[in-house]
Image: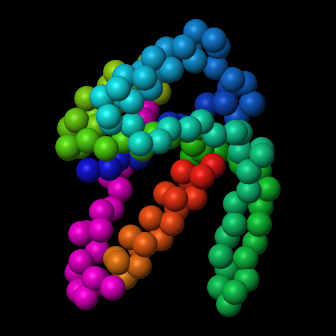
Amino acid sequence: MKFMIIVPASKESEAGQLPSGEELAKMGAFNEELVKAGVMLAGEGLHASSKGARITFEGAGKTAVKDGPFAETKELIAGFWIIQVKSREEAIQWMKRAPFPAGTTLEIRQLFADEDFAPSDPTGELREKEAKLREQVEKQNAKS
């Protein structure tokens, strides 16, 4: 099972302030544990929302783009992990060990798997196309 762990933004991350060397070292050690255990698939920090944009789909092919920063820090994401574990409980146990300060709340969300779409794709044709796209992405990522 794959899970995304969503790390919330803070006033500091939204101000573009990077964690201290000590905080980065602790997070690096935790990431190393995840990698050694074969759990971590991806993990990245995100720039402040001031460097981002939001696209709103308004219908009839129209979109609206709003440049950051965005006002509600509590709604923003500062980073993420994608991990692969056997259960939601295992994901929780790993993330309980993450080196975050008191008051931080991580969100753990399971990613859909191919078999989850079987009721909507009884022939498997759409899932097969998606699998081919994933293979192409993996090949492109291997080149870079």
- The residue under the point 67% across, 80% down is 58
As drawn, the residue found furthest toward the front would be 143
Residue 60: give x, y in percent of width and height. 68, 90
How many numbered marks are there?
0
Frontmost residue, 55 versus 45: 45
Q: Is residue 18 visible?
A: yes
Do we see residue 101 in this rendering?
no
Q: Is residue 106 magenta?
A: yes
Q: How is the image coloured?
A: rainbow
Residue 103 as seen in the image, left or right of residue 70: left
Residues drawn in magenta: 105-125
Q: Tell me where residue 89 appears, x and y as whole percent.
A: 20, 38
- Compared with residue 137, is residue 2 higher up or lower down, i.e. above or below? above
Task: Judge whether residue 2 is colored magenta.
Answer: no
The residue that appears at 50% across and 20% down in the rendered structure is 28
Location of residue 54 in the rendering, given as x and y in whole percent from the top left corner: 70, 60
Compare residues 118 and 129 and report the one nearer the observer.
Answer: 129
Tell me which residue sits at (25%, 29%) in the image.
Answer: 93
In this view, the residue in front, 128 or 84, is 128
In the rendered image, the residue lying farthest to the top is: 22
Is residue 144 shown left or right of residue 36? right
Q: Residue at the spot x=29%, y=68% of the render?
A: 114
Q: To which quarter of the image does residue 91 belong?
A: top left
Q: Would residue 51 appear left or right of 31 to someone viewing this image?
A: right
Q: Please provide percent x and percent y for residue 55.
A: 69, 66
Q: Quadrant of residue 9?
A: top right
Vertical position of residue 143 compared to residue 65: above or below: above
